[in-house]
Amino acid sequence: MDVEKNFHMKGGHDETSYSRNSSLQKKASDMVKHITMETIQEAYTSTTPEILSIADLGCSSGPNTFSMIRDMYRTVEEAYRNTLINGSKSPELSSVSVYLNDLPTNDFNSIFKDLPDFINQEVISKNEQGHFRPSLFVAASPGSFYAPIFPSNFLHFIYSSYSLHWLSKVPPGIYDEDGKSMNKGCIYISESSPPRIIVAYSQQFRDDFSRFLHLRSQELTKGGRMVLIFLGRETPHHFDRGNSFLWNLLAQSFAVLISKGEVEEEKLNSYDVHFYAPSKEEIEEEVRKEGSFKLVRMEMFQIEREGTNNVVSYGMAVASTVRAIQESMISHHFGEHILDSLFNTYAQLLDQEMAKQEIRPITFLLVLNKI
Ligand SMILES: C[S@@+](CC[C@H](N)C(=O)[O-])C[C@H]1O[C@@H](n2cnc3c(N)ncnc32)[C@H](O)[C@@H]1O
């Protein structure tokens, strides 16, 4: 399946949209926001440009996109004011440019519909009240982040949250010579996956991540910084209760639909996700081997369980989050008609499992300075 053409978060603002089902990602990125903001301040003070250029890679659409722009803009403005107070002779910060990147099928329209109100609130009305604020420009930069997106030496800060666990494609190594997946009955690495499946996923991550680092190092200016937040795994073992278990439960939900005659077995056998949760060691090794960045900070943290509104169960809340992310791929492969049945089953399995033991996805935060 062509990821670039078919993969996108559920757009718009309806009940099943990413915009309404992304509070888990927001909560998690907020847990490390102080590090992101500290790093953007450093990016500004080590470069002090007239126009500060920031990119958010895998921005999606909805409140998370805007809250990140707001936080980054306010932090840079404060860093600029501090340089003035400290009597620095650095040039005036005239503007902050934010480049929103995602795959071309992302719902950029809904972002740009909400943008005028946001800019008015954040910048124009403040300037009218006599508080000078640098101009804020927001532009879209569609395309895969596994390809060049910006000119050389263009950006001062790169941010990416909950996006880099998505590979550029399903690893070709999982298919046999007839093009059939050798990971039958599974959609990601599971306990029953043959070893070659693990090798194929791990290799795809290494190739993609190394390419990503190389491309970004060209796009960042000297002194530029990067904050990357993405899912990973706690130990070198591939089957964990954090991430692979969630995919396993989704595969079990498909199996329930097969038993009811709602999905053909062959369809499940030919469906695999382009996802990978790397370990700390795999990440560190690729950063070292690629050689363009110094890894100045690496944190591993667990996403805390969210309180729900008691109207829906916790399993249903997690199922809705996964649905907003996976709906485009699943409906392309299996058809839209299975979505409600699939995700209701998934919510039930999640509730049953979580009653036994917590499932806590693992996240990494990386701060990388261009060498
Ligand atoms: C779960 S969303 C995260 C959105 C937002 N950053 C947040 O924290 O809520 C992941 C985003 O990464 C995007 N993405 C995945 N692979 C990508 C790629 N190769 N290039 C650009 N964007 C990609 C997806 O389309 C999706 O919008």
Image: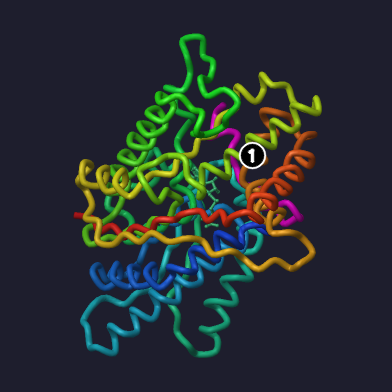
Q: Position of residue 340 (x, y in %)?
A: 78, 42
| Along the line of sight, the residue nearer the viewer: 190 or 122 | 190
Is 63 drawn above or below residue 216 in the view shown?
Answer: below
Q: Label 1: how many residues lie within 10 Å, few (<14), some (14-19) or many (20+)?
A: many
Identify the residue at image location x=61%, y=58%: 22
Identify the residue at image location x=25%, y=56%: 295
Is 220 drawn above or below residue 195 in the view shown?
Answer: below
Q: Position of residue 91 (x, y in %)?
A: 27, 75
According to the image, label 1 marks what residue?
Answer: 250
Colour option used: rainbow
Q: Quadrant of the N terminus?
A: top right
| Along the line of sight, the residue nearer the viewer: 172 or 11 | 172
Is 88 drawn above or below residue 102 in the view shown?
Answer: below
Identify the residue at image location x=45%, y=84%: 132
Magenta region, main secondary structure? loop
| Along the line of sight, the residue nearer the viewer: 72 or 137 | 72
Q: Which residues are magenta?
A: 1-18
Judge left or right: residue 210 versus residue 126: left
Q: Position of residue 144 (x, y in %)?
A: 46, 40
Is 129 drawn above or below residue 259 in the view shown?
Answer: below
Identify the residue at image location x=55%, y=76%: 122
Q: Position of residue 71 (x, y in %)?
A: 48, 72
Q: Is residue 328 magenta?
A: no
Q: At label 1, which amino acid type do we have?
A: Leu
Determine whether the residue tagged by mark 1 lies in a helix, strand or loop: helix
Judge left or right: residue 137 versus residue 317: left
Judge left or right: residue 307 versus residue 189: right
Q: Is residue 3 magenta?
A: yes
Identify the image quadrant of residue 250. top right
Q: Quadrant of the C terminus?
A: bottom left
Identify the image quadrant of residue 332. top right
Judge left or right: residue 112 versus residue 52: right
